[in-house]
Image (tube, grey):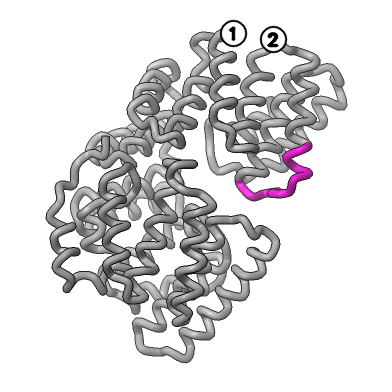
Amino acid sequence: MRGKKYFSIAGYPHKEVRLAEKMQLKAIELAPDFAQAYAELGLIYAEMYWEGTDPSEECLKQARSMIDKALALAPHAAESHQALGWYYYHGLRDFGRALDEFSRVLELQPNNAMARASMAWVQRRQGKWKEAIEGLQTVVLLDPREAWYRYELGFTYFYCRRYHDAIALFDEVIDLHPNTPAAYLVKSFALLNLTGETRQAREALDDGKACTGRTPQLTWFEVYYDFCDKDYEHAFGLLTSPGVVLHPNNPDSSDYYFMKGACLSKMKKLSAAEVYFDSARVKLESRLAQSSESAALLSSLARVYTWLGKSDKAIESATRATRLLPVSADALTGPDYILDLAMVYAQTGHEEKAMELLDYLLSIPNFVSVNALKLLPEFNHLHSNPRFQELLKKDNRSAI
């Protein structure tokens, strides 16, 4: 139980995952036949692999080893099949087999909220957005006091451009659990997409700072909104040292160097900007050498190459990211890399290619809308293009 306090797949981020691992290992030491501890440890290793805490194949093997022990000790226990489902989901990205295991859990425990939520999370990645929403609505009814389920339903509404519904859910999350940084961040970006300006989005960030303090992810949003508003001096003042700013989906010290370089470039201090961009490049290339199949790293590197004037390398890197994780393989994360490629195209003079991708993105669920496109600084080069102006006339409607 102490281990589960440190780690739960119903609550992120898992800052204390190593402590959770130690607790479960201690539980197994005290009770070598305790199947639930093996299942929980398997879950922990699968998440460590997925989140990048330990992306090694050895970690994935450990996850399967622990889950196999749980299944051997308790083959009909819901916890064993739940863990196996997450191994297939976050370990192997085998969504079909993951759903089979979560369905098995529901056969054993029909009102298991986590199993139903897990199915919904998998269905989002399969592009089954309607089914995912219906599943998460049921989960909220089954476990109304769990703030994270409400957050996930709100997040799903947000991706489907149902911004009013999303914001209402994020407000409920904040009422239940005010110290949930992600609720303020996604609410903020939902407000930007809804209103087409940064004022209310910034107010949501201020509410977050009042409750949770300033976090590196929150600072990333504030700096990004400064770029939207062309307030580069203020953005520069927030970038005081590495670690103060982290991209929510790909936290890395390179974010600081990249964003500081962008500020300096906008402030016409080009020589200093190049030094920071090159520092970001070195860090990302070093990480990529260890994880060559990381779409997130490739996309981040593509943005750096763009600002360094390495257009061909930027396009190559961003394109490779879209091929490693296409929308057909992951409807939740895949569009992020399509958007990054569109940004690279827009900033390297390939305007028609950028708009083809933007037109496609506006037809599917993802985190960008017509209102956001009016503001996002990466697309400032397109504002004089008649086709881009036509895109901006599209309805900001729900994607499902």
Residue at the spot of label 2: 76
Quarter of the image containing the N terminus?
Answer: top right
Q: Along the line of sight, which residue is nearer the eye, 314 or 244? A: 314
**Image: 285 above or below 125:** below
Q: Amino acid at mark 1?
A: Leu
What residue appears at the point 61 percent right and 30 percent down from the top-left corner? 86
Callouts 1 and 2 close, C-beta under 8 Å: yes
Q: Nearer the viewer, residue 249 or 243?
A: 249
Quadrant of res 76: top right
Q: Position of residue 329 (x, y in %)?
A: 49, 41
Asked if residue 154 is positioned above or below residue 204 in the image, the reply reads above
In the rendered image, is residue 328 in sight? Answer: yes
Work out whether 337 lies above or below 80: below
Name which residue lies at 75% across and 45% down.
57
Question: x, y percentage for residue 399?
Answer: 26, 39
Where does label 1 land, which residue?
108
Which range of residues does the magenta coloring cover?
51-61
Q: Secondary structure at mark 2?
A: loop
Task: Tell me where residue 94 sits by quadrant.
Answer: top right
| Residue drawn where x is 48% and y is 59% of the image | 247
